[in-house]
Image (cartoon, rainbow, N blue to C red):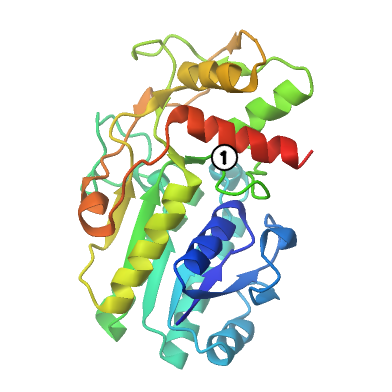
């Protein structure tokens, strides 16, 4: 049994590939390395450098490796930047998904796990986000992920595609010392870079209606996330019924100040974060229920906040 992982050289995708390997499931990777890293893919995993927009490449990989299903992680993932580059975002995330699905249909590959996002909900004011929370994306990135879900839904009706989408929130931590988050926009890399460079990390707003005044978000360990992708793939392979989409969430979340406190505690670097003005459009709290995923995919939070920080810090410093 072999599964194609698109974007399998990225931070999340590489964790998914290794989780598949540990479950005894073969993987093959397509990645254009626009944000991924070739060294994240172990030498025994087949790797093809290229874009999922290249339909002939996708067809060749699906055929040559007798692929049973696809875990689709590839995409342009920077929500803020997507506002400035909407056409690029739609090309990568919508057209890329369409090309992938067309190739799958031509070859007869009928199973897909889609890497979606909490961005489909936008800046919701619901205290606890469920799969039924209204979708109101506020960026081309969020819109493109919602359209991706629609493409899977419609292909399910038209061609019997077995599918599910995993909507996740803030992915952090590391499951392996050689895999780490290199995004220039995510909280953990920004905080770690500041500490390494002798700067003081910043909190944007401490006057929100939350227990300590800072934003509350759902932080998920990337290894837990990878395990959920494998569970979804195994469920589809067995023919088990799955929901169209699942939230992967903690149910309670953590504040930015709690993250800063954990970073100081774990790294041993004593600092008091600077307080900056709120960023426009930042909601006070976005936390999701993971109950459906727990029921169907065995989803659970296996790591504490300190675990998340420690594993991320150790991987970051090992790479320095």
Query: Vertically, is 15 above or below 211?
Result: below
Quadrant of residue 265 in the image?
Answer: top right
Horizontal and vertical percent for residue 285?
35, 26
* Most foreground residue, 157 or 190: 190
Q: Residues within 10 Å of mark 1 (few under 14, many from 20)?
A: few
The local secondary structure at tag 1 comes to helix
Query: Vertically, is 222 above or below 275?
Result: below
Residue under label 1: 80
Horizontal and vertical percent for residue 287?
32, 33
Q: Quadrant of the N terminus?
A: bottom left
> Can see residue 173?
yes
* Most foreground residue, 205 or 41: 41
> Can see residue 148?
no
Query: Vertically, is 305 above or below 45?
Result: above
Report the number of numbered marks.
Answer: 1
Q: Residue at x 58, y 55 (%)?
A: 76
Q: Quadrant of the C terminus?
A: top right
Q: Residue at x 50, y 22 (%)?
A: 259
Horizontal and vertical percent for residue 289?
25, 40
Lateral position of residue 2 relative to residue 208, left or right: right
* Most foreground residue, 179 or 281: 179
Lateral position of residue 31 relative to residue 290, left or right: right
Q: Residue at x 62, y 56 (%)?
A: 10
Lateral position of residue 129 relative to residue 91, left or right: left
* Most foreground residue, 304 or 120: 304
């Amino acid at each position: 049994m072999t599964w194609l992982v698109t974007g399998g050289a990225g931070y999340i995708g590489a964790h998914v590939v290794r989780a598949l390997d540990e479950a005894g499931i073969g993987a093959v990777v397509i990645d254009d390395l626009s944000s991924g890293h070739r060294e994240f893919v172990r030498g025994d995993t087949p790797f093809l450098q290229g874009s999922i927009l290249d339909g002939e490449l996708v067809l060749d990989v699906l055929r040559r490796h007798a692929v049973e299903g696809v875990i689709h992680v590839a995409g342009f993932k920077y929500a803020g930047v997507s506002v400035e580059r909407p056409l690029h975002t739609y090309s990568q995330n919508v057209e890329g998904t369409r090309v992938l699905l067309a190739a799958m249909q031509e070859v007869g590959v009928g199973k897909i796990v889609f890497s979606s996002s909490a961005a489909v909900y936008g800046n919701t004011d619901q205290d606890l986000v469920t799969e039924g929370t209204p979708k109101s994306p506020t960026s081309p990135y969020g819109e493109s992920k919602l359209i991706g879900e629609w493409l899977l839904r419609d292909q399910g009706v038209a061609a019997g595609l077995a599918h599910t989408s995993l909507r996740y929130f803030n992915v952090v931590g590391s499951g392996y010392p050689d895999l780490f988050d290199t995004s220039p926009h995510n909280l953990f890399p920004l905080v770690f870079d500041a500490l390494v460079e002798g700067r003081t990390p910043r909190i944007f707003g401490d006057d929100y209606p939350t227990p300590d005044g800072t934003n509350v978000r759902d932080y998920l360990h990337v290894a837990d996330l990878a395990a959920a992708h494998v569970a979804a793939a195994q469920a589809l392979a067995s023919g088990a019924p799955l929901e169209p989409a699942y939230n992967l969430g903690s149910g309670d979340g953590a504040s930015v100040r709690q993250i800063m406190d954990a970073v100081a505690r774990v790294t041993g670097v004593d600092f008091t974060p600077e307080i900056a003005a709120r960023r426009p459009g930042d909601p006070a709290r976005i936390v999701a229920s993971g109950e459906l995923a727990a029921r169907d995919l065995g989803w659970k939070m296996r790591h504490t906040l300190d675990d998340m920080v420690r594993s991320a810090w150790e991987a970051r410093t090992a790479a320095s």
